[in-house]
Amino acid sequence: MSKYKIEFDRELCIGCQSCNRISRNWGLDSEGKAKPANLDVEEADLQHNMEAEKYCPVHAIKVVKKQD
Amino acid sequence: MNENSKDSTILCAPHANNDKNVGTNIGVANDVLRTSANAQTNLNTTKVMTASAKALGDFAPVAPITDGKEKPRILLITSSFEENLNNPESSDRALVQEKMDNAHYPIGISLLHSYVESVGNEINSLFLNSYSYEICFEEVDKALKEFKPHIVGLQILTQNRVSSYHIIEKIHREYPHMQIVLGGIHATAMHEQLIKKFPYVIAVIGEGEYTFAELIKKVMTKEDISQVKGISYSKDGNAITTPARPLIDDLDAQPFPKHELYFNHKREFACILTSRGCPFRCSFCALESITRSLNRTRSIRNVVDEIEYIQKKFPQLRRVWIHDDTFFLNNKRAIEFCDEIARRKIKLEFVASGRIKPVSAELIKKLEEANFVKILFGLESGTDKILLAARKGITQKDVLETFRLLRKSKMEVTAFLIVGLPGETMETVLSTAKFVQQLQKLKYIYYDDIGILNIYPGTEVCRLAKEAGALSDDYWLSEKITPIYTVEHSLEELKHYKKVLLDHISLRRFFTPDGFKAQYHMIPYIPRYLWERKELILDKLGKKVVKRGTHL
């Protein structure tokens, strides 16, 4: 079971596509806003999702550790 | 943002570490008589051949190893722009200096200057963008002779590449013991080509602070440079490019830019950078080469600390110009900046540029409270078709929404336009004219001039021009000026488009026959703008009713 999950605030998203250039987990929805393919993050995908969080200019993406 | 708009002018102090020299115009000294023509004919073959491995066309370490007591001496140069070639004013030292007293200064070079100095080097910077080639070459010659740098770094922009090429050849010919390092946006985009043309130089790719500092250490000790990330150099006749260096994320850890280089008693405005990089990828913009379209920010506390530092050191400071690629990207952060300015009771004027979307009503209110007097947007076109093709990520609807919010604002608003983007026709020009007039009815925008699309290496429009067979990379090695995008229209047609657009939107054209015909219905919307700027207008007319506010 994955230890991390994504919290995404779609309202904040400005559609700049930083996340989808950095992380394969991120695409765009029909309105040009970011859309994660998976909200659960496996260990192998942690790095690129963390990069997406780091470079989101409006801090709409958070990768958080799941509660035990 | 177009490269045109960045790092426009400035020449400054020869001895940055010495406060006594702050604001000194190195251009005043006039004891060097070499001209560019002289320099070109003074080829010294013997000196070239003494740099042994260079005969093979490869990079080879040349800078002497110092004894450890002597600091490495680094000279940074940003040389004359091509626009000075046929501009007699650029040969008038006093006039250029006067213009530069309150002009923008290049933040990139001043950040690099500060960082390189902070890690134990002696550094001088020459800012020669606004001077004629002749004066530029004289000043470089003088600095080479007097400062005797071990390493010379040149900031290569597309507009100063030609004068930079002359300087590179001159240094290699006459000072073969000095290591030449190239950096800047053009050097980043075209590093392979430059390394093949000048195999004895090293190119720094992308943000230069850490790479250049590491390179200085390696070069000064003649160590192997192959492990330095983010560089390109020649080996066995090939351009070798090392793995990319990570972007600088912790911007707060960087020293403040060397504002001291530019300030004299006349200067009243400072330039600052609160963030780096724009995540959008407009088809005409070259910025991606450097910042990889990733936005990084300084903390607001760190930014405002810098403003207070400048204000304390230079009490005459009146205005701060925020040179971010896009300051409004995160409205929340821009609001936080305004709140901090208010909290610390800083009484200055601010100017910033950014995207037209998102701009909230709350942001506009906060900007006004913090005393932003002017905001600049990149509009580029007034038709959705062109905006989409240019990958602007905005529509007419977005623009109108922002201008409706700005309707009652006292801030001056500028919306830059470019004529000749891919897909432009007379129909789109007229559509843009109509749309801009619609905006002017909401919030008047003053147009002095507008640009015709230039091509910069590394951009989408450059790729399109190459695909169409209108441009090859050889162009960048020529002495021709930065090319215009003439894939779809001739230069004459583009100039006509520009004239038509200006006739519709520029107040300066109002009293011309074509301008009046296109603008007479705008008469009700102009008086408010003129009234709000009456002091500036009267001042420009020479009546000097106020002493301040002359350099909008």
Image (cartoon, coloured by chain):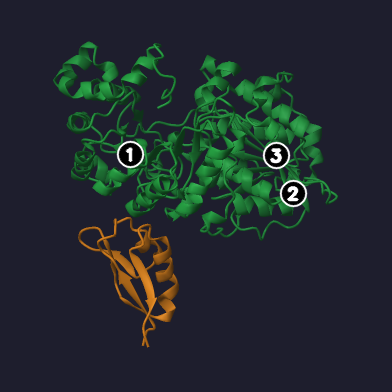
Chain colours: A orange, B green
Separation (CA) of disc 3 from disc 1: 37 Å
Res A41 visible:
yes
> On what subunit does the disc labeled 2 rest?
B
| Residue beneath disc 3 | B17
Is the residue B462 above or below the residue B452 in the image?
A: below
- Position of the C terminus of chain B by quadrant: top left
Res B236 visible:
no
Q: Which mark is residue B378?
A: 1
Total numbered labels: 3
**Would you say B338 lies left or right of B170 here?**
left
Q: Residues within 10 Å of mark 1 (few under 14, many from 20)?
A: some
Is the residue B291 above or below the residue B372 in the image?
A: below
**Observer-nearest of A15 and B345:** B345
Q: Looking at the picture, how far across and down is residue A61, in whole percent? A: 35, 66
Q: How crowded is mark 2: few (under 14 residues within 10 Å), some or many (20 or more)?
A: many
Residue type indicated by callout 3:
Asn
**Observer-nearest of B346 and B237:** B346
